[in-house]
Structures are given as C-alpha cells and as structure tokens.
Amino acid sequence: MRLLLFSLKRIILLVPILLGISVVTFTMTHVLPGDPLYILLSPYAKQEDIQAEKVRLGLDKPLYVQYGIYLENLLHGDLGYAYRTRRPVTEDLKQRFPATLEVTMLALVLATIIGIPLGVQSAVKKDSSSDHFVRILSVGGVSLPIFLVGVILVYFVYFKWHLAPPPMGRIAMNVPPPKTITGLYLVDSLLTHNWTAFRSSAWYIMLPVFTLSFAMLAPIMRITRNSMLEVMNTNYVRTANAFGLPRQTVIYKDTLRNALLPVITSIGLILGWSLGGEVLVEVVFSWPGMGNYAVNSILNTDFAPVQGFVLVTATIYVVINLVVDLLYTAVDPRITI
Amino acid sequence: MAQIKTLQPSLFHSIKTAFKRYDFEFYLLRRNPLTMIGLVIIVIVILLGVFAPTIAPYNPLDVAPAVRLQGPSTQHWMGTDDYGRDILSRVLYATRVDLSIAFSAVTLAAVIGVTLGAAAGFMRGGTDEVTMRLLDIVQAFPAFILAMGLAVVLGSGQSTIVYVVAFIMIPVFARLTRSEILSARERGYTEVARCMGATNQEIVFKQMLPNCMTPILVQYGLSMSYAFLDAAALSFIGLGVHPPQAEWGSMVNQGVGFIASGQWWMSFFPGLIMAITILGFNLIADGFRDVFDPKLRN
C-alpha cells in the first residue's frame, strides 16, 4: 500500500519533467532559427502568401498560444506531419518502434548476462590476468565508437567469414515478414510458428545486437566490479569469511546481492545512453527503426519527425528511469517508505 | 582589504602549493603505466594534429579519379577514398578538426557549467532551485538524442557541433561545481575570509573555486572522450562538418557503404585514430579518478 502511494507520488512528479521536455522540443521547432515557413514555401513566395501560410499554421499567434496548441496536439498523440513519407509522424514512429525495441532489449539482456559474471570474476580475482582482461575490455568498450564496432563486425563476420547476412534490414528479402502481432519479428514468428521467418530475423538481428551490447557491456562490467570491490570490504563480508562460510556462498549470497543495487540503478542510465547508440547501430545496419527514420529525415531536411523522435525517446527515457527507481525501492530492503 | 591581500599569495606561488599538496597523487599517477601510456598517446595525437599541414603527404581535398578506392600501399599508406583522396592526409587534417571541436566544446561547457554551478551553490535559494530544475530538464533527455535535435535546428556545421556538444555537457560541470561549492561554504577558510571582510566575489573566485579545481579538472578529462564520441557521432549521421572537409565521423560514414564490398580502409583508419585518441583520454581520466577518489585507492 505504501509502495503504491510512493509510486503514485513519483508518477505525479513526472508531470513537470514531461512538461519541461515538451517546452524544449517546442522551442526547437518554434523559437530557434530554422523557420518552418522557409522549408514549406519557395524563396520567391510573395509577402501575402507567407502571411496566409502563417495564419494557416497558427504562427501569427503569440508563443504561449502556440505552445498550448502544440501541447494539445501532443496529448492527442499528434506529433506533426512527415513530408518525406507523407504520413503523420506518430504513425511512422509507431510502425518503427518495435524494430528499435527488439534490438535494444536483446542487447541489454545479452550485455547483462555477460557483463555481471565478468564483473564479479574480475573483482573476486582482483589484479589477476582475468581482471586485467576485463579492465582492458571495459576501457576498450568505452573508447571504441559504436559505429566503428559495427563496421568492423560487418567487415569480418559478413564480408570475410560469411557468418552473417549483409547489413540490410530486419529479415531476408525473399522471406515474408511474420504476421504483425507485437511488431517484434522474433516474437511474432514464434507465436505464429513461422520458423523460416524466425530463423531469418534471428540471423539478421545478430550483428546489430552484438554491436549495441558491446557498448553496453563496458559500463555494466565496470560498475559491477567497483560495486563488488566496495561490498567485499565491508564488515559483514569479512565476518562471513571469518565464520568460515564457503567462498562461493559469501561471493554470491552475501556480496553479489548487495553489490547488485548500484548495477540496477545504472541500467536505467545505460539504457538511456544506448538510445543514442541505437541510432548509430541502425544507420550502420540499415535497420528500419526509429533512429534510422530520424536520420533519414535529417538528410531530407524534414524536421518534424526528428523533433517527434526526440520527444518520444526522452519520454521513454524518463519512464525507464522511473521504473528503475521503483524497482530499486522494491529490491533494496534498507529503503523503507 | 589590505589584510586580505597579504593573505593572498602570488598566483605562481598558489599554483605551486596546489601542486605540492598533491605530490603523493602525482607520484601515484607517474607510477601507473596506463596513465603514462594515455599521456603519450594524447601528446602524439596533438602533435599530429598541430603539424598536419607539414606531415600530410597530399592535399586532403585533392581529387584524383585515377587512384580511387586503392588499398593501403607505399604511395598511400592508408589507401584512397572513392574520390581518390589520400586517406592518411585526410585523417591528419581530421585530427586537427576533431581536436579543436572537442577542446572548444568541453572548455565552453566547463566555463558555463562552473559559473552556473558556482552561482547556484553560493546563492542557494531561488537561483539554486531554478538552475537545478532547468538542469533536470536538460538531463531528462538522452544526451546524444538532445544533441541531435538541437543540431538539426541550428543547421549542420562545425560551430553547431561545438555548441551542441557543449550544451549537453553543461549539467555535469554545473552539478559538480555546485556540490563542491556547497561543501566549501562550510569550510573554515570561507568563514575566515568573510570575517576579514572579503566580498562575495572574492570569496567565490579567490577562495572557493581554486579549492574546487581538482574534481573539475578530472571531469574535464573525462568529458573530452565523450566530446570526441559525440562530435564524431553527430558527423556520422550527417550533422557535422560540411563534406569536402575531413572529419573522423564523416570519414567513417563515407566508408560504410564500401565495407560490404571489402574496402575496409576508408572507415577503418579514421575510426582507429579516433578510438586511440579516446582511449588516451580515458586512460588519463581513469588514472586521475583512481588517484583522486580515495574510496578506490588502495
């Protein structure tokens, strides 16, 4: 009950942040240079035409009225119109969202499964060769630009070794995509028992997921390692060791469980940061997700989709952080509400 | 005021004593081989960037269709791109561009962020509240995506990248400075300065900020590597410097289309130099963090 009340309070606190986000995206489109009129009209348009277009778009009204209209449209799920695809931005983003979600989630799961055990090993065997390996891997992971990792993987795995499909899309050209249920190809093809589609989409998603998870791996390993080291120095772990508890019990039961809390918090941050990395991955692999859509819109000087994308990802990020916060409260026994 | 002046040592002396205070830390830094490797990398990269016009064997913009898409050879150490331009020369000139982008962006962010943070931390109350809430909103965005949105509005180009990368880094510097200033308020030397009749300005600029410099400098080093990554990523998606000019991110992007057919050198070499540079800054920042964060020191 108290947890519920606390959650409710946190959700209400979300409102000013979301309003702030909308003010920023509104400012991007309406206040800063790059007047939408110059994009819509030819440079030779007459003064009357400009005026008429201004009235039609509501640009003659004072800014706060324009913001009100913008906000009202947002609440109706209207993010504007994409001139490039000739469709509402909301429709476009909705259609591309599952592709982005699929890669990000798989990459996060993979990075966590690999990163946490490696971090633990490296802390337990501090200054051993496996520790040095993990540390080099984590410095390398932060230093290698994500698009370079993608490019290197494509070169070796696809071009040299023929172990992966070409970096073009979510599924082979000659395989019809599975019936849309969730929009996640892997899930949809499993649900419809469409094994050809499942194999093909798993084949195509492999390299994008590896690329993104390589970038997520480094921070997860590093935080796990540091957090483990910190907990291993506490009195209760020393006591557990002094009582002669088996080493494995001390490491996994006493140390890891306490060390995982900061890791959970950081996963929210890592996810938010990886939303940016995902854009780059999608460009390298021509992955038809939201990021690729935004970048293609940039290249075609169509800006409404970009602002829509910025708004949507910021909202997702804020919600992820809220969920992580609530999760943290639920997991950490020391936090009583 | 005269009394205060006598308390103030000369600038040279205060820098010397500031360093002296960290003698042990510098000793630890020198002993860490990784930090030294990082330092060597950075010095080499900076020299390469500064002397690019002298070292570069070709003009980075010279188009030569006869030698397009050639692999690494004795004539072209890093090969040529699809216009026949020499990649080594372009990488060297790109190093110049990227170094200047990263340095300007981080410096700008540090100056604005430290000012904001110091103001918020020192004045507290309304100023603090407003500044912090504004920073909350900036940080509610995933940083790179916000940079993307802003760069679109400002229009692509080198100065845009500097402003945008600086903008997304302001919050880190502001928060750090604010927390340092807040703890400096409680220190004895602040009290003493106030009793001696120092003005607010003198307290902030002459007493508090010099004492907060270490964590801010560590953050400066950490931010450099992010600045390189963000600037190159923005160029990679087409928001960076304009085409004929060379830049790491846009050079990698230019080569992406050729990877699937095996022309790896176009993307690989600019990416490699970039990764090495970032590695250098990360190693140094890591070394500093280990030494100056007593919790991690052992």
Image (cartoon, coloured by chain):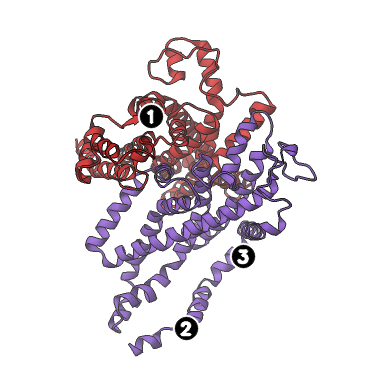
Chain colours: A red, B purple
Which image quadrant for residue A173? top right
Q: Earlier in the sequence, mark 2 or mark 3?
A: 2
Same subunit, tags 2 and 1: no
Nearest-to-viewer mark from 1 and 3: 1
Instruction: Identify residue type, mark 3.
Output: Arg
Task: Work out whether residue A156 can be spotted.
Answer: yes
Residue A184 horizontal side relative to residue A328, left or right: right
Which image quadrant for residue A45? top left
Residue wearing tag 1: A83
Instruction: Identify residue type, mark 1.
Output: Tyr
Identify the element where label 2 is drawn. loop
**Residue visible at 53% across and 52% down in the picture:** B225
Residue B217: x, y in percent? Answer: 48, 63
Vertical order, A181 against A106 (above or below): above
Nearest-to-viewer mark from 2 and 3: 2
Residue wearing tag 2: B10
Report the residue that reaches farthest toward the top.
A193
Which image quadrant for residue B265? top right
Residue B24 horizontal side relative to residue A53, left or right: right
Q: Which quadrant would the N terminus of chain B be assigned to in this image?
A: bottom left
| Chain at numbered mark 1 | A
Residue A51: x, y in percent? Answer: 26, 39
**Residue visible at 55% across and 22% down in the picture:** A204
Front residue of A184 and A313: A313
Nearest-to-viewer mark from 2 and 1: 1
Report the residue that reaches farthest toward the right.
B74
| Chain at numbered mark 3 | B
| Marker disc for residue B30 | 3
Same subunit, tags 1 and 3: no
Instruction: Identify residue type, mark 2.
Output: Ser
| Marker disc for residue B69 | none
